[in-house]
Amino acid sequence: MENHLKQYLEEFLDRPVSLVLTENSTSMLSARMHDGVLRVRLHRMFLNAGSRVLSEIASYLKNRRGAMPHFRSFIRDNREQLSLKPPKKVLVRTAGKFHDLCGLYDEINREYFGGAINAAITWGTRSPRCAVRKRTVGSYSERSNTIRINPILDKKTVPRCYVALIVYHEMLHAAMGTPLRGKRRSVHSREFREREKLFKDYEKAMAWEGGKV
């Protein structure tokens, strides 16, 4: 079945494909180009998916965006196949005074990840130490599968596009993981930076960023 799926993807995409089946429930689907080969990582349960789901996966890999209702429905219907350890309970708070993380997350997940990211997202806790050290505006914990956004961004003066870029950045971490380069982990690889620039408001958000946060 694995070889048939690999062959299907190669024929649809008209390019060589390296397919790795995983038990990773954090990111059900991810892909990157390397030496002319599209390296696809896909949760093993999709070997049992129907033609509509596989067609959505192939279309997403080709265009790197687009809604995937059948894909998401398949995940919901097959939750029992996910071998996740019970995660540490995280207090989730998405509604801010000026920005709603839940709305941003859902919008970005649909448009850029086909709904494949299932990380939790929350505003972080406020700390007075933020005022005296370099601020981290966002973070992703692979262990708890949680994205935290610094509440310093929940201000009227911070544009929605900038908060959205930070959310997208952390969702990329959830999608791509942290690959090894030699013996070192590459947190922000060249591929990561290239994908980050695919965000539709990247230039606008980066233009605002200088000296504002």
Image (tube, rainbow, N blue to C red):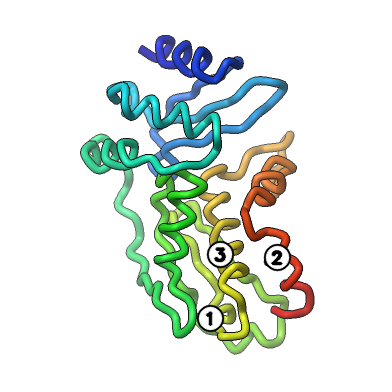
Residues at marks 1 and 3, CA–CA distance in whole angstroms:
12 Å
| Viewport quadrant of the N terminus | top left
Q: Position of residue 49 (x, y in %)?
A: 29, 25
N-terminal of the pair, mark 2 or mark 1, is 1
Q: Which mark is residue 204?
A: 2
User: Mark 2 falls on what kind of element?
Assistant: helix
Which residue is at the front of the view, 156 or 25? Answer: 156
N-terminal of the pair, mark 3 or mark 2, is 3
Q: Residue at x 60, y 24 (%)?
A: 38
Q: Residue at x 43, y 48 (%)?
A: 117
In this image, 194 relative to 177: left or right?
right
In this image, 186 relative to 93: left or right?
right
Q: Which residue is mark 3?
A: 164
Q: Which residue is mark 1?
A: 154
The amino acid marked with disc number 3 is Ala
**Vertical order, 88 against 208 (above or below):** above
Q: Mark 1 near mark 3, Cβ–Cβ under 8 Å?
A: no
Q: Position of residue 16 (x, y in %)?
A: 60, 15
Q: Mark 2 near mark 1, Cβ–Cβ under 8 Å?
A: no
Which residue is at the front of the view, 61 or 31? Answer: 61
Q: Quadrant of residue 213?
A: bottom right
The amino acid marked with disc number 2 is Lys
Q: Position of residue 209 (x, y in %)?
A: 73, 72
Q: Position of residue 211 (x, y in %)?
A: 78, 78
